[in-house]
Each structure stands twice: as structure tokens, then as C-alpha cells.
Image: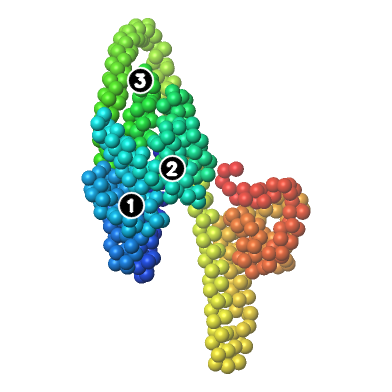
Amino acid sequence: MDSILSNREAYHNSKEMYISILKNYAKKKQSKEELLKIYEDLYQEYYVYQFDSARVYINKAILLSQQIKRTDHVIQNLLYKVQLFGIGGLYSEASNLLNTIQVNKMPKELYFLYYITRFTLYSYRSDYCNDDYYSPRYRALAAYSLKMAMPYLTSNMPEYDFYHGEYYIYVTRNDKKALSYYFKTISHQKETSRYYAMACFAIANNYNAHGDTRKYEKYLIQACISDALCNTRENLALQDFAIFLFKEGQKSENHVERADKYINIALEDAKLYNNRLRILEISQKLPTIVSTYEGMIKSNNRKLELTISIISILIFISIFGIVLIFRQNKLLALHRKQFCDSNNQLTLLNNKLNILNSALLDTNRKREGLAKLYIDLCAKYIDRLSKYQNLVKRKIKANQVNELLSTISSSRLSEENAKTFTNRFDKAFLDLYPTFIDEFNSLLIDGQSKKKEKMPKNSMTNEQRIYALIRLGVQESSEIASLLFYSPQTIYNYRSAVKNRAKNKDTFDDDVQNLCTIIK
């Protein structure tokens, strides 16, 4: 749970990204039916995430559904708005809005949503009152509304099992039967589903009512995890878990510290959501946890002050003893100082040597980078020239200038560029690594690579050129073939032939990469 809570920002960023996609899609030209669907989707995304934004988009959905005369969507979105007001603590506004809906004129498929909306609203009002007079009345109204909703709950609905569990809790008071339906809910719902989180929370409270603390803690943690994965800021589970930790572990500093952490996360989410009920609940519970936590910190500080005082006395005694020893061993201390000075000088020299060595290695890497950059630029130039040649061909064909087409189609230009590239590559590489050919030959059994007769100065054979590229870090035969204008099979054949003449075939490529280095 701690791991998931530490990644809350990443989950929120992911949700914000999806919401941004929906908003951008809404800005594009859409039909009114499609736009209504997007507004309703945005409301669902904001419903337990941000109250004010959810209200904006449910108002837009209501207005648009009225404009296109979709009565069913008007009523549906009004009920959604009642649910939103209920969760946000605007109970009078929610009740007034609910009373404007005429049940007898409502489509039958919305009856379940209507009665469930009444159930959730009265449940919230009961929790808000939390007294012996109004709270039981609202609880009874909630139970009646749930009972009225059950005939319209069909088995193909994802919330079928969850609301059966609620029915057996609030109406028939059959905890065992309710528990079985809650477990069915978490068996087929994903952990990122809000019904999964609510079912885990209900299971936890069921076990808590029967005194099973271990299972209460287990499923309450699972509800907290699911709330975090769902990006739910209406998270009563985390608040209750903080209180549980505080009550169970007041003697444990770790438990109280966790309780303080979790209750503050719950308060932050309630403020971000703008949930008046949760803010009020947490505000009543927070001072007790904070004061206890601060008391533990003060106690620790007092212990720390006492420890520092004892340490200070010990230090004073130690200093007094050191002074006595120093007087008796002044000569030894002088020799020791001289030894330390010599050691410091050696350390300084060693550090300078390390700095010089690092600089030398860095220079070597820069040289390699420059060589590779030069080679890459030459190869790109040849490729660009080849593409230009193809372009000229097409234009000549269009104008039917056959003689010019014949001249441009000649491969002599590409061959000359390739030759120029290899000559410049040889010169650049051997300038950087003048001992490469000798060191490379020393890796071969016969002591030398195959040479053509009368080879120019500062040039390499095809074999040497291939392994020069390997020395620069170009490992793949296909890349080498592209740079040297050969087929990959030709490169493979060259490499195989040279490796067969290597003194150590298993490490030959690694040995080549270690050639011409300053430190081996």
C-alpha cells in the first residue's frame, strides 16, 4: 500500500492525460449526440476525482440533452447531479433537485438509478448527522429506497452483486448473506473498479462488526489500494485505516507516524475533491493523531537532548584524557603528523594522476567520437548523392533526354565517391590510430592481414577497414556493409576469414576493440 500511495502522482497524471484527451476530442467538431456522450464520460471521470469539474460537465450534459430533447438523458444526468451534490455535502440542494424529478413520467430503465440515487443521498445525510435523532430517520429512508431499487436490478448489471450485498446489510440485516455477495463482487470486478473498492470496504466493516480485527485490517488495506488505483479522492477507507492504526498502535511510534501520514493524505484528497463531509470528519479526527504524533516527537527530542548531554560529558572526559596523552607522546605525535603529511602528498599526487588519466581517456573517447562522426557524415553524403542521381534520372526520363540519362546513370560517380570515402576514412583512422595495423596484425596467427601489392601509404585492406569500424564500435555486419558499400554476406565472409586466422577466436572482436588504447 505504501508503494502504491507513493506513486499517487503518477496515477493522477495518467488520469489527467486521459481527461485531456476527452477534452480535446470535445473541442473538435462533433455531432451533438457524440458531444453529449463525451460530457457524460468527463463527468464520470471527475465524479469521485474533482467535485467542481464534475459539476461543470454534468451541467453541460443536462443543457445539451435538453437542447436535443433527449428526455431520458436529461433525467439520467439530473440524477447524476443529485449523486454529485450528495457526495459533495450539498444535501439540501440534492434533495430539492431530486424532488423536481417526476417518477411517474420517468422511463422504466431509469428507475433503478433513481432509487439508488435516493439510497446514496440518504446514506450520506445519515453519516453527516451522526446523531440519535436524524441519523436513524435518514438510514431508514436509505433502506427503503434500496428496497425499492432491487426489482429493477438485473443480473447483467456490473453492480448486481454489490447492491445485493448492500440490500442484505441495510434491509434484511443478514451479514453472512451480504458477505457472500461482496466476495462475488471482488471475484469478477477488477482492482481498478470502484465497485471493487467499495466491496472491500464493506467486507472490512462486516468483519469489524464481528470483532475480526485481522480480516478487517486486510480488506481495509485492499480498499485503500483500490481507491488509489482508481484515483478516488472520496476515500473513506484510508481515513478509517489511519484511525485504526492510531487506536491499535498508540504505543508504537511507527504506527502513529503512519496514521499521521495517511490521515493527511486523506485530508489532502478531501480538499482537492472539495468534499465537505470528509473534510469535516477528518478535521475532527486529525488533531488527536497530530497531537499524539507531536508528543512522541517531543519525547524523542527530550531523549535526544539527554543523549547529547551524556555524549558531551564523555567528549569532555575524552578531550581531557587526550591532552594528558598528548603531553606524554609529543614526539610520537610529531612523527605521526609528518607521516600524515607525506601520505597526504602521495594522495594528492595520486589524485592528480587519476585526473590526468581520466582526461587522457576522455580525450581518447573524443577522438573516437570525431572519427565516427566524420565517417557517418561521409556515408550520408554518398547516400544523398545517390538519391540526387535517382532524382535526375526521373526528370531526364520525363524529358526523354536519353544521352544525359545515360551519362547520369553511370555508376562511375558512386564508385568514385566510395573510393574517395574509403581513402579519407583510411587516412582519418590511421591519423587517430597510427599503430592500429601493427597491433591488429599481432592478433593474427600469421602476423599479418592480407595485402594487395603496391598499396598506397596511409591505406588499409578491406579486412583492416572492416575491423577498424569494429574498433570504432560498429558491430553489426549490415551497418559495416552499408558504410563500405558491400553486401552483408561479403562482410560476414571477410570477418569469418580473419577470425579463422586469429590467435584467440573466442575473444577476437573484444581484443580488436581494445587495440590502440592508452590504458588496458
Q: Residue furthest front?
A: 104
Residue 106, picture quadrant: bottom left
**What's the amino acid at mark 2?**
Tyr
Q: Which mark is residue 389?
A: none
* Numbered tag placed on residue 163 in the rendering: 2
- Could you say which disc has been placed on residue 250 in the image? 3
Q: Amino acid at mark 1?
A: Tyr
Rounded to the nearest angstrom, the CA distance separating label 2 from label 3 is 36 Å
Query: In what quadrant of the picture does the N terminus appear?
Result: top left
Q: Report if the CB atoms under discs 2 and 3 are less than 8 Å apart.
A: no
Mark closer to the observer (2, 3): 2
Pick whichever of labels 3 and 1 is earlier in the sequence.
Answer: 1
Provide the residue designation for mark 1.
80
User: Residue 466's spot in the image, x, y percent?
Assistant: 66, 60
Q: Earlier in the sequence, mark 1 or mark 2?
A: 1
For badge 3, the amino acid type reads Gln
Work out whether 306 lies above or below 128. above
Q: Label 1: state its secondary structure.
A: helix
Q: Determine whether 35 is above or below 171 in the image.
A: below
Label 2 neighbour load within 10 Å: few <14, some 14-19, many 20+: many
